Image (spheres, rainbow, N blue to C red):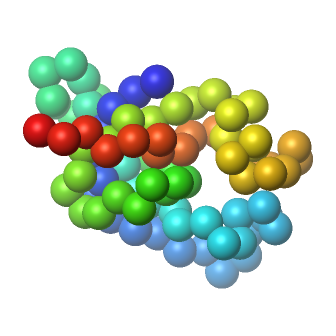
Amino acid sequence: MRWGEVIGRTTATVKHASLEAQRLILVQPLDAGSAAEGDPMVVIDAVGSRHGDRVLMTSDGRSVRKLLNDDTAPARWAIIGIIND
């Protein structure tokens, strides 16, 4: 698991069928001191986060595929919680 900050949204004109109804969010991963760590990544938003929210993400592909109800989903990262400051 990692935490990050929502920095935007993204769209795709063509995507895997398992991602059709999913919101795709841009998240900047953060280190323990809240500094940016690495490149932003596209994450499935399972909780309805908004721009500026700090979120908890999982990289457990099996859990993400279960969330999407599709064992062939090409997804790895999903937001599983919003961190209240």
Would you place residue 35 above or below residue 32 in this image? below
Q: Position of residue 3 (x, y in %)?
A: 33, 32
Residue 65 as seen in the image, left or right of residue 1: right
> How far from the left and from the top, in percent, is residue 9?
40, 68
| 10 sits left or right of 28 in the view | right
Residue drawn at x 68%, y 34% is 63
Residue ID at (84%, 50%)? 70
Q: Is residue 80 left or right of residue 85?
A: right
Which quarter of the figure has residue 34? Answer: top left
Residue 56: percent from left, percent from top: 38, 35
Q: Residue at x 52, y 62 (%)?
A: 24
Residue at 19%, 41% (x, y): give it: 84
Q: Residue furthest bottom?
A: 13
Q: Position of residue 46 (x, y in %)?
A: 52, 54
Q: Is residue 54 left or right of residue 65?
A: left
Q: How many marks?
A: 0
Please tell me which residue lies in front, 9 or 46.
46
For the C terminus, the image quarter is top left
Answer whether residue 61 is visible to the viewer in this image: yes
Tell me if I can see residue 42 in this picture.
no
Q: From this viewpoint, which residue is outermost toward the top?
A: 32
Q: Is residue 19 above or below residue 40?
A: below
